[in-house]
């Protein structure tokens, strides 16, 4: 059985000291590929360099809505350069995580929207899929997607945290939903309802490490090996064999990120 961790901040300093051990533990439980995510241009550059250094790592580059206030002409040039370089070496598989976060509101909302839409255009230009980050902004996000035809671009709403209705709507528009360790938490009503409301062909698995470690690792630094716990929980929830859930979510991720093997 193999799994892909489709979203992990592995270039984060929390992994600096023991990255090799982290990757060994991942391999042991079948997590044989990890998509490394940055949250601004510097960490996206780190993600690309890390991906280039290990065969099992790939990356995503973009400016998180938290950092949208840093978006400017220079950022446009830098993200375009990362996309060109990352596509050429086959290590960059999407633009992300980009979107709207009206929960923390760390950047003004108008700037979040501006940075989001500008990065959608860069994804379009480079024919790359998108990893979306959306929190407390699902209805507006759906409205903007519809208005700007963003669902012409393949994408995943990572760490999906909306309602089952919003999840079903996004899947109908053509997007995948990313399932994290939140599925294993006690307060998981929305995501539980969502995984029943959409087809399994619309789901992919992610850790979002170092955040959101699943039960029984809750509170610890989250790492790719812990993806196994989320996969088990999803299999239990859907009353399907773990192997089937692994194979099908893996196939979904491969299709989205266009992995050849
Ligand atoms: Zn996120
Ligand atoms: Zn993330």
Image (tube, rainbow, N blue to C red):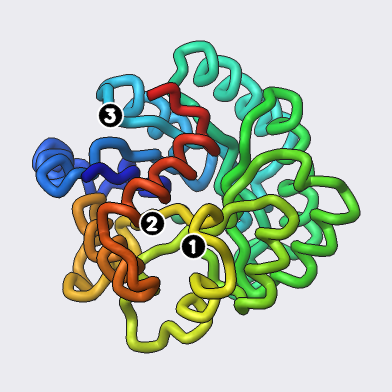
- The dot on residue 159 is 1
Above or below, 19 against 148 in this view is above
User: What residue would you read off at disc 2?
Assistant: 208
Residue 82, given in percent of the width and then of the height, sits at 55, 23
Residue visible at 47% across and 86% down in the picture: 189
Residue drawn 68% across and 29% down? 74
Circle nearer the N terminus (2, 1): 1
Identify which residue, 128 or 261, lies in the foreground. 261
N-term-proximal mark, 1 vs 3: 3
Question: Looking at the image, do the residues carrying marks 1 and 3 touch, with CB atoms under 8 Å apart?
Answer: no
Residue depicted at 26% across the width and 59% down the height? 242
Q: Is residue 200 visible?
A: yes
> Which type of secondary structure does the marked residue at label 3 adopt?
loop
Mark 2 residue element: loop
Residue 222 percent across, percent down from the top left: 25, 60
Residue extending farthest top: 88
Residue wearing tag 3: 56
Residues at badges 2 and 1 in contact (C-beta under 8 Å)? yes
The crowd level at tag 1 (other Cα within 10 Å; few <14, some 14-19, many 20+) is many
Among the 4 quarters of the image, the one containing residue 137: bottom right
């Amino acid at each position: 059985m193999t799994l892909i961790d489709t979203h992990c901040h592995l270039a984060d300093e929390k992994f600096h000291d023991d990255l090799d051990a982290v990757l060994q533990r991942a391999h042991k439980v079948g997590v044989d590929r990890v998509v490394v995510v940055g949250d601004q241009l510097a960490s996206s550059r780190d993600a690309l360099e890390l991906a280039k250094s290990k065969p099992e790592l790939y990356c995503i580059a973009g400016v998180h809505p938290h950092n949208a206030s840093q978006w400017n002409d220079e950022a446009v040039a830098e993200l375009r350069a990362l996309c060109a370089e990352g596509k050429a070496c086959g290590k960059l598989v999407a633009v992300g995580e980009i979107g709207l976060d009206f929960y923390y509101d760390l950047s003004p909302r108008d700037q979040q929207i501006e940075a989001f839409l500008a990065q959608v255009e860069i994804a379009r230009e480079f024919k790359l899929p998108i990893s979306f980050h959306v929190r407390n902004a699902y209805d507006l996000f759906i409205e903007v997607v519809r208005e700007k035809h963003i669902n012409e671009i393949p994408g995943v709403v990572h760490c999906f945290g909306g309602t089952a209705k919003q999840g079903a709507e996004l899947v109908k528009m053509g997007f995948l939903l990313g399932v994290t360790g939140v599925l294993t938490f006690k307060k998981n009503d929305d995501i539980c309802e969502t995984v029943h409301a959409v087809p399994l062909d619309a789901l992919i698995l992610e850790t979002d490490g170092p955040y959101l470690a699943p039960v029984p690792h809750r509170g610890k630094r989250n790492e790719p090996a812990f993806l196994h716990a989320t996969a088990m929980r999803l299999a239990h929830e859907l009353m399907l064999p773990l192997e089937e859930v692994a194979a099908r979510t893996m196939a979904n991720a491969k299709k989205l990120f266009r992995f050849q093997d």
